[in-house]
Image (spheres, grey):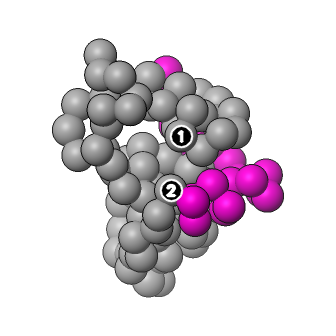
Amino acid sequence: MYVSGRMPKGEYAYHKLTLEEAKNLVSRGNFVSAVRDNTTASVLSYLLEVTIPVNKEPVIDSKEEGLIFVPHGQVRGVKVSDIDFHFNLVFPLR
């Protein structure tokens, strides 16, 4: 599983997750960060209570499920407590 701040290319089904469900997924430690931005990595680390490192290498495998952070507006320059967001768990269709 990968964690990202962007939807991958391709065809996917998805399921919205609560913050607690997302925390439970990453607490197992079996994920790869696909987060390319320092701000997004910091916000995700804070929200998920686990270190989400910046990783600028392409790691998204279109055959894997992924946890996608979906902010509803600007993240940069905004207090984390003021960010409106949800998470999607995406599943490849092919």
Amino acid type indicated by mark 1: Leu
Q: Which amino acid type corresponds to the residue marked 2 in the rendered image?
A: Leu
Q: x, y (%) of residue 81?
A: 38, 32
Q: Residue furthest top?
A: 77
Left or right, 73 with reference to 2: left
Instruction: Measure the alpha-carbon separation of dots 2 and 1.
Output: 8 Å
Q: Is residue 61 visible?
A: no
Q: Residues within 10 Å of mark 1 (few under 14, many from 20)?
A: some
Q: Quadrant of the rendered structure where residue 12 is?
A: bottom left
Q: Quadrant of residue 56?
A: top right
Give the camera-side residue of 22 and 40: 22
What is the span of residues highlighted in magenta in the rendered image? 20-38
Kind of element beneath mark 1: helix
**Can residue 94 be seen in the rendering of this structure?**
yes
Residue drawn at (57%, 32%) of the image: 46
Residue at screen point 58% across, 65% down:
21
Task: Out of 28 and 46, give the one closest to the viewer.
Answer: 46
Residue 55 on the magenta span:
no
The residue wearing badge 2 is 19
Q: Say how many tags the image has.
A: 2
The N terminus: image quadrant: bottom right
Q: Is 25 located above or below residue 52 in the figure?
A: below
Residue 83 picture location, percent across and down: 31, 36
Check disc 1 and report the residue beneath it. 47
- Name which residue lies at 67% across and 62% down: 25
Q: Looking at the image, which is closer to me, 35 or 18?
A: 18
